[in-house]
Image (cartoon, coloured by chain):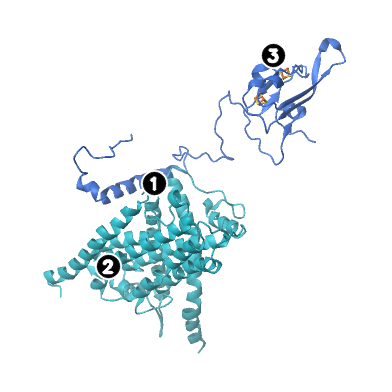
Chain colours: A cyan, B blue
């Protein structure tokens, strides 16, 4: 039947194309939020002059103008650069960023008659592990980019980033274990669905409610993983000029630039799915919504709820960036190994013991 | 009011625990930035904005009346040039950017006038010495600060006389 093919097409061809496109378009919004937000936080206005068809549109077109500018800029490749790796590095940082988002559910399974369309690109039963496996690949792009450029600052940036990623990936992974203990699944859609339950009859059982410390640790680790201030030591303009992408120009630079923002969106999506109830609208479980407004509108509302939460976390990233100064390198390592790691372990311990003490099991 | 906190703790003491774990202070800092953001956003559409940006081509900074901008040559009420081509301004100019070619009026009682009076504005440092040197008060400086151009401009007599209006050439 043709409708079978249609459903198959939507699931296997449309989503894998649309989701990356939406993500890359989201970079525009992210850059806009970043720059205008920074402006208003610092008592400035921020870029607001680029017009589209004669309309100012509050500077929303500025990132597009920047991207076009970068596209037509001169492409500079250092003489002694390892050309193959130099070309490979931006791609290597972009692709894992896009891939990780594939397992994040942006809506509950859409049930239309006999068809079940999961609103995510790949409904992996190891979703959480997949994200960890792929997102750690992103560091290769940074390390190789720093190394291949044959520049002392670049290689410092690359080295810093690898050390930082390894340190914070551990805390990140351990912070997640609490969530795994609570929700007993690594399939992201299951985790999100379970966050629709109510605790004590009124509190949504979101990850942030049952795992507040886990949320804090994960959020800090996510800042570090996405190289955002206060953990942007791989870039650190003031110390190592621009770090790993110092020698990059033109389109390759914009690849790194976009990868950073896509990574932020992935991290936000991940935080939202694990700790903020994903696509859940508080107090409105899918069944109730479907019964009242029908399946299509339910899906739309849930995607909207997911988007709102995601952009809220993105905004918090921006907000943190324009509030805090950058760490010194030893402080960064000290925080990662001496504070976050013990706290994450303690969090696992408490999460495992408390249910027994309370007699939940 | 800005409250200033000492950056190091009192002698022999450590910071209180609330500051050593940073989190409280971080949230305070984020509260501060949020306060700025909200205040700036709320007042942005209104008259009394709190953002300090002067959005240049739309708004300009107010200059003092003593601002030393582009020069202009003044005329007498009858329309003749005030300048008598004495070259005192050129002599005083520290960057030697004034060029004057004097010429005599046909009527000897009227003295000289500048046949060419050119200011090489790309060399001018806007010190105003030319204005101070002039015995006739023939040259003064306007508040015009926008002199960007795509060529190296030498402002000639017509241009300086026209009070900055670009004469049709
Ligand atoms: S302002 Fe100063 S530098 Fe400029 S023309 Fe007059 S004397 Fe020369
Ligand atoms: S502008 Fe004044 S100082 Fe200069 S030549 Fe004319 S009269 Fe003399």
User: Residue A211: image x %, image y %?
Assistant: 24, 64
As drawn, the residue found furthest toward the right would be: B106
Does the Cβ of the disc 2 residue fall within 8 Å of ligand 1?
no
The answer to whether residue A258 is visible is: no
Does the Cβ of the disc 3 residue fall within 8 Å of ligand 2?
yes
The residue where tag 3 is placed is: B135
Image quadrant where residue B120 sits: top right
Side of A137 relative to A194 (left or right): right
Q: Are marks 2 and 3 on the same chain?
A: no
Local SS, label 3: loop
Distance between the alpha carbons at the discs numbered 2 and 1: 36 Å
Numbered label tally: 3
Q: Sequence order check: which comes first, mark 3 or mark 1?
A: 1
The residue where tag 2 is placed is: A174
| Label 2 environment density (alpha carbons within 10 Å; few <14, some 14–19, many ≥20) | many
The residue where tag 1 is placed is: B38
């Amino acid at each position: 039947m043709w409708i079978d093919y249609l459903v198959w097409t939507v699931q296997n061809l449309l989503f894998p194309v649309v989701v990356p496109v939406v993500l890359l378009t989201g970079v525009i919004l992210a850059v806009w939020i970043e720059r205008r937000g920074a402006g208003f936080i610092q008592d400035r206005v921020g870029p607001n002059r680029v017009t589209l068809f004669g309309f100012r549109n509050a500077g929303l077109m500025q990132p597009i103008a920047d991207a076009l500018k970068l596209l037509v800029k001169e492409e500079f490749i250092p003489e002694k650069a390892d050309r193959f790796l130099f070309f490979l590095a931006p791609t290597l940082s972009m692709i894992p960023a896009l891939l990780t988002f594939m397992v994040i559910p942006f809506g509950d399974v859409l049930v239309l008659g006999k068809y079940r369309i999961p609103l995510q690109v790949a409904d992996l039963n190891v979703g959480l592990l997949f994200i960890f496996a792929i997102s750690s690949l992103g560091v290769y792009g940074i390390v190789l980019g720093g190394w291949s450029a044959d520049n002392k600052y670049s290689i410092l940036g690359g080295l810093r980033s690898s050390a930082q990623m390894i340190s914070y990936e551990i805390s990140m992974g351990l912070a997640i274990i609490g969530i795994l203990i609570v929700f007993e699944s690594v399939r992201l859609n299951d985790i999100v669905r379970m966050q629709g339950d109510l605790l004590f009859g009124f509190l949504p059982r979101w990850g942030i409610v049952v795992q507040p410390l886990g949320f804090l640790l994960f959020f800090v680790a996510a800042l570090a993983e996405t190289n955002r201030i206060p953990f942007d030591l791989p870039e650190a303009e003031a110390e190592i000029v621009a770090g790993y992408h110092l020698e990059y120009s033109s389109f390759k630079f914009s690849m790194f630039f976009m990868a950073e923002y896509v990574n932020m969106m992935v991290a936000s999506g991940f935080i939202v799915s694990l700790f903020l109830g994903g696509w859940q609208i508080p107090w409105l479980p899918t069944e109730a919504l479907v019964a009242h407004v029908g399946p299509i509108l339910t899906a739309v509302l849930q995607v909207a709820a997911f988007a709102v939460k995601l952009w809220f976390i993105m905004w918090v990233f921006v907000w943190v960036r324009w509030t805090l100064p950058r760490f010194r390198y030893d402080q960064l390592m000290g925080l990662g190994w001496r504070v976050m790691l013990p706290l994450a372990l303690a969090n696992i311990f408490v999460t495992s013991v408390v249910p027994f003490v309370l007699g939940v099991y | 009011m800005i409250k200033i906190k000492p950056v190091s703790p009192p002698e022999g003491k450590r910071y209180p625990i609330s500051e050593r774990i940073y989190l409280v202070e971080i949230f305070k800092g984020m509260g501060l930035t949020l306060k700025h953001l909200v205040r700036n956003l709320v007042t942005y559409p209104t008259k009394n904005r709190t953002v300090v940006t002067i959005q240049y081509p739309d708004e300009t900074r107010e200059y003092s009346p003593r601002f030393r901008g582009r020069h202009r040559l003044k005329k007498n009420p009858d329309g003749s040039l005030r300048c008598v081509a004495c070259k005192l301004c050129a002599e005083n100019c520290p960057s030697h950017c004034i060029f004057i070619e004097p010429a005599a009026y046909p009527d000897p009682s009227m003295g000289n006038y500048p046949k060419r009076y050119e200011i090489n504005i790309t060399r001018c440092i806007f010190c105003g010495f030319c204005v101070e040197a002039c015995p006739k008060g023939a040259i003064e400086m306007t508040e015009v600060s926008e002199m960007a151009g795509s060529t190296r401009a030498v402002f000639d007599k017509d241009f300086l006389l026209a009070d900055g209006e670009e004469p049709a050439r």
